[in-house]
Image (tube, rainbow, N blue to C red):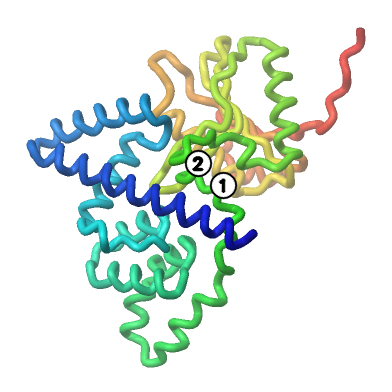
Amino acid sequence: MIEAQRQVYTTVNTAMVTAYWKIGKSISDACRENDRAAYGKQVLQYISKRMTKEFGKGFDLSNLHNMRRFYLTFPIQDALRPELSWTHYRSLMKVPDAKARAFYLEECTKSGWTSYQLERQINTMFYQRLLASRDKESVAEEIQTTEPKPEYEQIIKDTYVLEFLDLPANEHFYESSLEQALIDHLQKFLLELGCGFSFVVRQKHFNVDEQHFYIGLVFYNYILNCFVLIDLKTGFLTHQDIGQMQIYVNYYTRYQINEGDNPPVGLLLCAQKSDTLVQLILPEDNQQIYAAKYIPICPQRKN
């Protein structure tokens, strides 16, 4: 079973990396005809709209920029390694020094590093530490204790693979069965409740510096004239949860609201929370982020 999963992973990965390299080459060739920044941006916007319409998700401007950069960083297709995923290559592209990048590519392929192991080694300057260390063996061995080998059965959860296969990156891939059931119930409850709520999107996806974020539910309230962002937490509310909601609110404030809209509101629904913690994290004049406990089983209506 594991071997079959490995083969599926390798096949999908190779096809995805090859396709993105070829797309990057095509974009680079098209933009090379005219070096003006405005022209290049128009070309990317045109390609993005056309490919999204024809093939689905995965071809927004950010991804197309990465594909072009991929080709420019690795211009020889035969030098690409089938063992490395698109996530590996995205990390390698962030290494400015060519010698260090070549070192990480070789070590990653030889040692079978996961994308997380590679990212960690780059962030902790493994290449520079290895060059400076007298005990190179101990430095090289430390990575084996930091993270287990990849679990191929989890590959379906990889956002890039989902986009490449045109599978929906929705809550079924990212939430537990309990959270899924609660979100389903919450969505129906708010839609029936009315009071100016209009459903906008479920599992709103956006990228920030190569990191993926998913907002559980997004509504628009026509009475408040603002977006309402809802995230559900099945456990105890943490400061990380509140910080993540702050990212959601800031993202909508800066990139999604329209003229005349009021600032968005973020609502964290959780099984348990500390009022003191919430008060300490949020500013005293906070009017955007709220935390409340949910009731797992809602009472039935009386006839």
Q: Is residue 201 above or below residue 142?
A: above
- Judging depth in this view, the residue of 214 and 166 nearest the camera is 166
Image mark for residue 162: 2
User: Percent position (x, y) of residue 170?
Assistant: 58, 34
Total numbered labels: 2
User: Hey, which quadrant is residue 126 in on the image?
Assistant: bottom left
Residue shown at 40% from the left, 70% from the top: 109
Name the residue at the right extreme: 303
Question: Quick check: 49 left or right of 214?
Answer: left
Q: Quadrant of the N terminus?
A: bottom right
Tag 2 near tag 1, CB within 8 Å: yes
User: Percent position (x, y) of residue 209?
Assistant: 39, 47
Residue shown at 77% from the left, 40% from the top: 271
Q: Is residue 105 above or below residue 154?
A: below
Residue shown at 11% from the left, 41% from the top: 32
Label 2 packing within 10 angstroms: few (<14), some (14-19), many (20+): some
Question: Quick check: 68 left or right of 248?
Answer: left
Label 1 packing within 10 angstroms: few (<14), some (14-19), many (20+): few
Of labels 2 and 1, earlier in sequence is: 1
Image mark for residue 192: none
In terms of secondary structure, where does tag 1 sit?
helix
> Label 1 sits on what residue type?
Lys
Name the residue at the bottom extreme: 134
Name the residue at the top extreme: 303
User: Percent position (x, y) of residue 221?
Assistant: 57, 15
Residue shown at 48% from the left, 19% from the top: 262
Q: Quadrant of the C terminus?
A: top right
Q: Which residue is mark 1?
A: 157
Q: Is residue 57 above or below residue 301?
A: below
Q: Is residue 92 above or below residue 272?
A: below
> Label 2 sits on what residue type?
Leu
